[in-house]
Amino acid sequence: SEHTYPCDLALLAMGFTGPDQVVDQGALPRKEGCFDAEYGSYIVNSASLSGIGTEAPVFAAGDCRRGASLIVTALAEGRDVAAVIDSFSSRLLLCVTAVCASLG
């Protein structure tokens, strides 16, 4: 059955099997069944999320971005994407703080 869990951040560890449910929603155009995200940014191309209807950025790394590969590659990408998410959320927090201060 379907459930909705309100949250500020959701981290999904999908592993080798990939994001099957998202594929069913038509969000992943690549025939390998992987998220279309550029290496280095790890942010999923917004055009590939057309079936999801999300405004929030989606980050992908490891097997769900490149397909089945070596564990060391997935671990390295996991560390990289964690740093990218941390940087993104820090910038977002600064923007929210600045807006709140200006309303003040």
Image (tube, grey):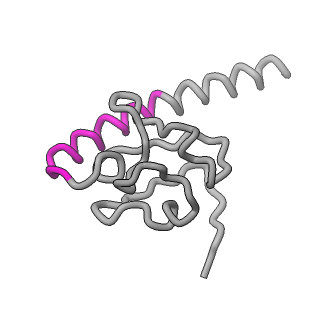
In this rendering, the answer to whether 70 lies above or below 80 is: below
Question: Of 42 and 25, which appears nearest the observer?
Answer: 25
- Residue at 39% from the left image edge and 32% from the top image edge: 38
Q: In this rendered view, identify the residue nearer to me: 73 or 99.
A: 73
- Point out residue 71 in the picture as x, y percentages from the top left corner: 16, 52
Say which quadrant the C terminus sits in.
Answer: top right
Pick the front one: 29 or 58:
29
Q: Is residue 82 magenta?
A: yes
Left or right? Give the position of 53 relative to 71. right
Left/right placement of residue 76 relative to residue 25 reads left
Give the left or right position of residue 91, taking residue 39 as reference. Answer: right
The vertical placement of 45 against 34, above or below, is above
Residue found at x 34% / y 44%: 61
Task: Report the residue that reaches farthest toward the bottom.
Answer: 1
On-image quarter of the N terminus: bottom right
Q: How many labels does the image show?
A: 0
* Residue 54 lies in the magenta-colored region: no
- Residue reaching furthest to the front: 31
Tell me where residue 60 appears, x and y as whole percent. 41, 44
Q: In which quarter of the image is residue 39?
A: top left
State the image quarter where residue 97 is shown.
top right
> What predominant SS class does the magenta segment belong to?
helix
Q: Does residue 20 appear left or right of residue 66 in this picture?
A: right
Q: Which residue is drawn at 35% across and 52% down?
A: 64
Residue 84 pos. (x, y %): 41, 31
Q: Residue 65 appears at what percent x and percent y?
A: 35, 46
Q: Please give the name of the residue rendered at 34% of the width and 54% of the height, measured from the top-left corner.
A: 32
Q: Foreground residue, 33 or 1?
A: 33
Q: Where does the magenta region start and end?
A: 69-87
